[in-house]
């Protein structure tokens, strides 16, 4: 399986294009690096929750495409919103590619089910849109914590949370309480957003 749909032919991320991307994130280089890593984590989660096979690669590809647009002179007003838009388009490309790969791998008698076109679920998309909006509204520290808290699976999740607790200088129980409070705040915001969303969005 191709790990990613290819970017614009012959374009590669250079040190210069990366510098321009970081400068767009924050004038301070160190702070820009932190913003970049936080945005990358959010994008990884974006692709994970949509069932993409290589979420880290797709997060990097999203940021590379944004860097290319900046290099080409694109004027970006809402930077985070622009990144989400690029990520959504890439997700549709990836979903289509994964569907094609599934067609090649399954037995012929299974194709009637496996070949069904990828369709967007309006209700699911509305929830995801609200999630992204509400996540962005969290304070940066809370946003980084909740994204990192839900990374990894099984044993990796346990090790990840133990490492977070050690880094923050708190007990695992205190970390769970913090994550629970942020999650409750996020859930409340999502519910409020969904009530306000137009039908079918």
Image: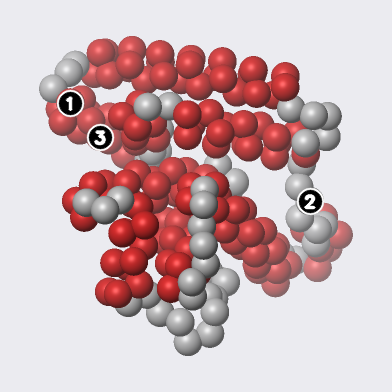
The residue to which callout 2 is attached is 119
The residue to which callout 1 is attached is 168
Query: Which quadrant holds the N terminus?
Result: bottom right
Report how far apart the C-alphas of labels 2 and 3 lie in the structure.
36 Å
For residue 159, which numbered disc appears in the image? 3
Q: Is residue 24 above or below residue 10?
A: above
| Contact between labelled residues 1 and 3, with CB atoms less than 8 Å apart | no
For residue 60, which numbered disc appears in the image? none
Q: Of callouts 3 and 1, which one flags the residue occurring earlier in the amino acid sequence?
A: 3
* Residue 53 in sight from this viewpoint: no
Instruction: Pinpoint residue 129: horizontal percent, then vertical percent.
Output: 63, 37
* Residue 26 in sight from this viewpoint: yes
Instruction: Pinpoint residue 36: horizontal percent, then vertical percent.
Output: 33, 51
Q: Nearer the viewer, mark 3 or mark 1?
A: 1
Q: Is residue 180 above or below residue 144?
A: above
- Regarding mark 2 in the picture, which secondary structure is present there? loop
Report how far apart the C-alphas of labels 3 and 1 lie in the structure.
14 Å
- Residue found 69% across the figure and 63% down from its top: 96
């Amino acid at each position: 399986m191709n790990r990613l749909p290819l970017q614009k032919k012959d374009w590669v991320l250079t040190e210069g294009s990366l510098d321009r991307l970081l400068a767009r994130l924050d004038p301070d280089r160190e702070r820009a690096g932190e913003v970049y890593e936080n945005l990358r984590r959010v994008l990884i989660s974006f692709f994970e929750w949509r069932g993409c096979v290589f979420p880290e690669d797709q997060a990097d590809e999203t940021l590379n495409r944004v860097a290319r647009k900046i290099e080409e002179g694109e004027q970006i007003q809402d930077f985070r919103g622009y990144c989400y838009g690029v990520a959504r388009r890439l997700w549709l490309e990836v979903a289509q590619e994964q569907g094609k790969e599934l067609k090649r791998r399954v037995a012929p008698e299974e194709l009637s089910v496996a070949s069904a076109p990828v369709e967007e679920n309006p209700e699911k998309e509305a929830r995801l849109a609200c999630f992204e909006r509400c996540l962005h509204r969290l304070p940066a520290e809370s946003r980084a914590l909740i994204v990192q808290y839900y990374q990894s699976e099984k044993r990796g999740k346990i090790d990840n949370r133990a490492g977070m607790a050690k880094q923050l200088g708190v007990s695992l129980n205190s970390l769970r309480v913090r994550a629970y409070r942020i999650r409750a705040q996020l859930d409340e915001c999502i519910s409020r957003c969904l009530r306000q969303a137009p039908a079918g969005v």
